[in-house]
Image (cartoon, rainbow, N blue to C red):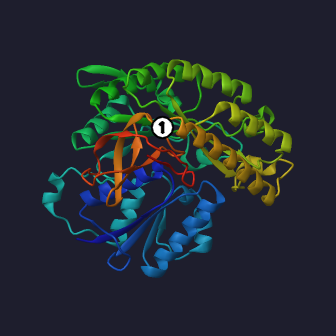
Amino acid sequence: MAKIGFVSLGCPKALVDSEQILSRLKALGYETSPTYEEAELVVVNTCGFITPAIEESLEAIGEALKENGKVVVTGCLGARPEVIRAKHPEVLEVTGPGEVERVLEAVQRVLPPKRDPLLDLIPPQVKLTPRHYAYVKISEGCNHRCSFCIIPKLRGGLRSRDAAEVLSEAARLVATGTKELLLIAQDLSAYGADLGHRPSFWGDRLVRAHLTDLLSAMGELGAWIRLHYVYPYPHVREILPLMAEGKVLPYLDVPLQHASPRILRLMRRPGGAESHLKTLEEWRRVVPHLAVRSSFIVGFPGETEEDFQILLDFLKEARLDRVGVFTYSEVEGAEANALPGPVPEEVKEERRARLMALQERISLEKNRALVGSVLEVLVDELPEPGLAVGRTYRDAPGIDGVVYVETDGTVRVGERIPVRITRAEVHDLHGVQV
């Protein structure tokens, strides 16, 4: 069989795209190669969201060209082929995000497959995650027009999958050993709006393309369900009872981006410190053990020390479980680049360090309050004898929901094990020792 090398960069949504491409290539008779030397062609799935990601993608393309010579480029940066060809004119083909057919055409043109009729009888399924968890993308694109973001230009507007299609995929994954389903989209809360929330038949019943209905049906499959990238729309309240019932993990990844109302208006984002806190209070009233992760941008054009202090004060009161912080990075095509009052790089980095130091103290306090409690952990790795690394059901400890567990050496990857927390520390903002 012809051998293809593959480099996948970027977010979990891009990882799902990579899985789809590899699954289709497998069905066409291609094998994957773990090295440049053995591969007859390399596909690089790029990220183009922020400047560091663009630089990483261009570097990965250059490495593939140097080590192999035959390279097809796809992904978000592929939506700007002029950037890629200016740096690497020798690439064979450049395709945009989600353009699976164009990738397949380019590969087959350069490296025709040797067909095996028996392969047509094998359902293609390539996963780039371990067997026990999987990302499930329920929609593509985004209808928001945040001033700092170019995702709608790269991936287009919102395009949701029918509920029956998503549920069928989830059921297949659970049937083959998946214990945790991580639902992803650019905006999970908007799921189905472009379809008018139309229903579709899953088995003998109709399920609407609406996040609440989808989760209610998916919760019956018996796997953990974790939500990523949930915008704080009012209807998020409808999901909370499903968390309280145990059908969905009590975890929300909500990109709030800032707390200063003035900066949020410049970002074209909703809310502010007061409304954020009110929303969090309402959510926690329904699900007291709810874990909330959020991401924030510091150094946005026009951000003053007063604006930044509003953000710090918000975090002190909000006491979020996990926080990611990015310094504002100019991306070609983002409208925020033209805003007045650019913040010097050294100020951005200083603010980021102050914010993370604050969040580390908050996380340590929350972690230590859990000492003595028992949590259920899904084991992801066994890095050394007597040590397991995994994620919790409640997802309470650690900035990223990661726990390090001392074991007797008998546990296996993919197992769910009860763990009593005997000590809790923040480790480089990545997890907690239990």
Amino acid under disc 1: Val
Residue name at image x 40 percent, y 22 percent: 213
| Residue ID for mark 1 | 371
Residue name at image x 27 percent, y 65 percent: 30
> Circle 1 sits in a helix, a strand or a loop, which is it?
loop
Residue 106 position (above or below residue 420): below
Q: Is any part of residue 399 visible from this angle?
A: yes
As drawn, the residue found furthest toward the left would be 118
Could you say where residue 202 lies in the image, as x and y percent from the top left?
A: 28, 26
Residue 194 position (above or below residue 407): above
Q: Is any part of residue 328 visible from this angle?
A: no
Return the residue nearer the eye: 199 or 146: 146
Return the residue nearer the eye: 47 or 52: 52
Report the quarter where the N terminus lies: bottom left
Return the residue nearer the eye: 294 or 76: 294
How many residues crowd around disc 1 within 10 Å: few (fewer than 14), some, or many (20 or more)? Answer: some
Return the residue nearer the eye: 406 or 168: 406
Could you say where residue 170 lies in the image, as x and y percent from the top left?
A: 31, 37
Could you say where residue 174 lies in the image, as x and y percent from the top left?
A: 26, 39
Q: Quadrant of residue 22?
A: bottom left
Q: In the image, 233: left or right of 409?
A: right
Could you say where residue 9 lies in the image, as x and y percent from the top left?
A: 49, 60
Q: In the image, 284: left or right of 249?
A: right
Q: How many marks?
A: 1
Residue name at image x 52 percent, y 37 percent: 158
Q: In the image, 417: left or right of 323?
A: left
Q: Quadrant of residue 282?
A: top right
Q: Quadrant of residue 382?
A: bottom left
Q: In the image, 358: left or right of 75?
A: right
